[in-house]
Image (cartoon, coloured by chain):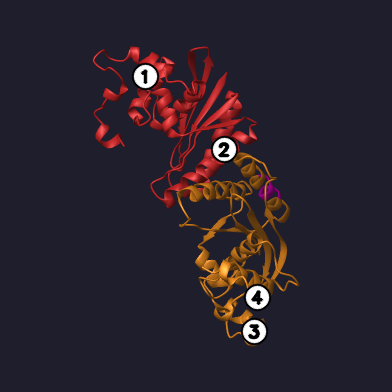
Chain colours: A red, B orange
Amino acid sequence: MRIFGIDPGSIRTGYGCVEAGGSRHVLVTCGAIAAPAGSSFAERLHVIHETLSRVLRETSPDCVAIENLFHARNVRSALQLGHARGVAMLAAVQAGVPIVEYTPAEIKLAVVGYGRADKVQVQHMVKLLLGLTALPKPFDASDALAAALCHSHSGTAALARRSTRSLPRHLKNWRDYRPATAGRQAP
Amino acid sequence: MRIFGIDPGSIRTGYGCVEAGGSRHVLVTCGAIAAPAGSSFAERLHVIHETLSRVLRETSPDCVAIENLFHARNVRSALQLGHARGVAMLAAVQAGVPIVEYTPAEIKLAVVGYGRADKVQVQHMVKLLLGLTALPKPFDASDALAAALCHSHSGTAALARRSTRSLPRHLKNWRDYRPATAGRQAP
């Protein structure tokens, strides 16, 4: 089963596709879409829609997993985020791919085993789960891959528990993990 | 010059196209897009985008005027509204039509002469300005036409002043106009 994750954002929209076969997951592609500097807001939306439509055509996934948001810093940022999420959902509907939605807490719980994990923790777990040799960057891409992995394992915390075996021995679980950048990244 | 106005909304999106020649305005088309009952949110966005793209192709306007929003009841409604506005803007960019944005207050000021006018006042002024025999309905359509008329007369209150000559004699200006439904509609 091929799952396509999207992390929508008006500045940068992350995407990532994984192939899920049993308990194994293989990275198909991932990246982040950023419109050229100086683009108008409408042009940015156009770039998001066009790129997602192209990648969806190329990867032909079985379903699209997208973050379901209920909160934003303020009404203005919610409006902007809504625009980007709207064109992302449109690209999926036009590609004829069913859409599943997960809250950020559900995604973090499924992937890290902790609903309030930060982006660095998510990024490290995505690397482990996909057996990558380097961290998937930027955060938009790793968040999108996390959404895809969440759908593959939705409802189970087993994923996170199993994978923490690969963690450095001094870390009992991801709650203990505090990256150097935590001050800037943590909620 | 042909101006296409859009009043985006996740439940119903209004649109209206006017032909502006000097001080005269002629209605080309107007309406509201509502997805069939029971549609998912993603399908609603698809219907909005598809219908707007079709009407933009049929009317081939010179520019699209759309409400610029900074406020919403709450973050959740801002997010939903953002989705609809995003796919509406996308339809305009894909049609190659430049987009202009006006705040609700700018639109009301230009069309009614009063920045806090209610939807019924806007609807009546749109009817007068376009010389229609009936009120343009629903409100989504009249609001979209108002956005188009605003662009045609942006920056002038002359429009509203001139048109109030057609008002019933006992009304000095639109501030005096209080429709029966004012209790429900007024800010």
Q: Please state which of residues B12 and B69 is positioned toward the viewer in this rendering.
A: B12
Q: Are marks 2 and 3 on the same chain?
A: no
Q: Quadrant of the C terminus of chain A?
A: top left
Q: Are marks 2 and 3 in contact (CB under 8 Å)?
A: no
Q: Are marks 2 and 1 on the same chain?
A: yes
Between the C-alphas of marks 1 and 3, the distance is 72 Å
Q: Which residue is mark 4?
A: B23
Q: CA distance from mark 2 to mark 4?
A: 41 Å
Q: Which residues are magenta?
A: B50-54
Query: Which callout, 4 or 3, points at the residue further toward the start of the chain?
Result: 4
Q: Which residue is mark 3?
A: B165
Q: Position of residue B70 (x, y in %)?
A: 46, 57
Mark whose residue sits in front, 2 or 1: 2
Of tags 4 and 3, the one toward the viewer is 3
Question: Mark 2 and mark 3: span between their CA atoms?
Answer: 48 Å
The Cα atoms of the two marked residues, 4 and 3, are separated by 15 Å
| Kind of residue at badge 3 | Arg
Q: Which percent across, then down, holds residue A36? A: 45, 42
Q: Earlier in the sequence, mark 2 or mark 1?
A: 2
Q: Residues within 10 Å of mark 2 (few under 14, many from 20)?
A: many
Q: From the image, tell me which residue sits under label 1.
A: A134
Q: Is residue B38 visible?
A: yes
Looking at the figure, which quarter contains the N terminus of chain A? top right
Residue topped by disc 2:
A89
Tell me which corner region of the image, top left, top right, bottom left or bottom right, holds residue B26: bottom right
